Image (cartoon, grey):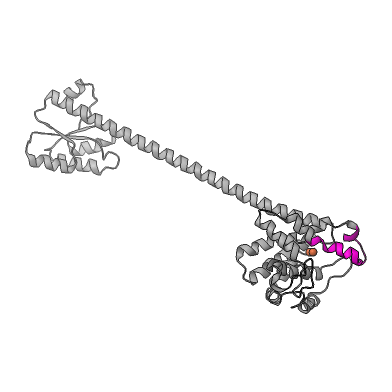
Amino acid sequence: MEAILTGLGYRVELAEDGFEAVAKLGLDIDLVLCDLMMPGMDGFEVVRQIRAHEKVSDLPVCMVTSLSGKEQRLRAVEAGANDFVAKPVDRLEIEVRVKALLKMQQAQKALKRHRAELEETVERRTASLREALQAMSQAQRNAHAAHVETIQRLAVAAEYKDEDTANHIHRMSHFARLVACELELPPGHCELILYASPMHDVGKLGIPDKILLKPGKLDSAEWEIMKTHTTIGGRILSDSNSELLRTGEIIALSHHEKWDGSGYPHGLAGDAIPIEGRISAIADVFDALTSRRPYKEPFSVEKSLEIIEEGRGSHFDSDVVDAFLRQLDAILLKRSEYSD
Ligand SMILES: [Fe+2]
Ligand SMILES: [Fe+2]
């Protein structure tokens, strides 16, 4: 058989018995021709071991046997043999069998390679898709952050003209968020109030400096102009697609409304005042009371709370006052975090 196969141009590895055959599987073998009846380890066992071996499990195995018994062949097929050649070996028969089995082996190898390449391509594409999605969500996150930051800066710019400071809007917006959460508004709504309440006085950009910065008391005509910072702010923020800016518009318009209807610009009363405005009002007033202003020293926390309490049911919604008082510790902590 060696002479026949070498003559056909194949390279042949010989094994004395089943043990050597199994040991030689580590070489680059394309086809196994194996006797059935061997001492120690028979052909059935050799095939079984090949099939159980992860790296060579699909290696074609052709049994060479003198037995023509049907039962032997069935057992060999069961063990995993692909084909048979009869002993004594016929040159033409072995040539045809070997050619066919090697062809099958090559097709299988190509299929395996193709599958591996395919898997690699899928993996690569999945990875780049994952990367693209990550980049996209990062871009969205950045855009959102930029959006929020732009609004914060706009609010700070408006406060620049005034006696207020950037810290005032940080403090009052955090107070407002704490009160909103205490009132059990949905978490998303509390966040909106945090980011939108800094815009409450954005309309002051439209108030002439001689009124806005006047050291003394405003006369009634000047006061009327001053009050328009609410409607100017509403106009600046109106008609936006952004939920954040729409909330800002609501707060700009309603943060000076009072529970009893004596506020401005529309004299709304009770529940007619949007909850965002009622919350921002108490946050804004408390911070103004406890802060130094050119015309006043800061009031103590106790004195400021007294003033808030006096406004219960007239200036402020009592439920909002209660929520504010329940959150007082957290509010004072935020106040010290952003002190001037
Ligand atoms: Fe205001
Ligand atoms: Fe304010």
The quadrant where residue 265 appears: bottom right
The magenta segment is 210-230
Quadrant (top left/top right/bottom left/bottom right) for the C terminus: bottom right
Picture layout, residue 117 above or below residue 232 = above
307 sits left or right of 179 in the view: right
Percent x, y for residue 339? 77, 64
Q: Quadrant of ligand 1?
A: bottom right
| Residue 226 covered by magenta stretch | yes
Which of the image's four quarters has the N terminus? top left
In the image, residue 149 lies at what x, y percent?
Answer: 70, 53
- Residue 314 at x, y percent in the picture: 77, 77
Of residues 3 and 172, the one nearer the viewer is: 172
Residue 27 visible? The answer is: no
In percent of the image, x 64 and y 65: which residue is there? Answer: 190
Residue plotted at (79% across, 77% down): 302
Q: Is residue 37 magenta?
A: no
Residue 8 sits in which quadrant?
top left
Q: What is the quadrant of residue 21 in the picture?
A: top left
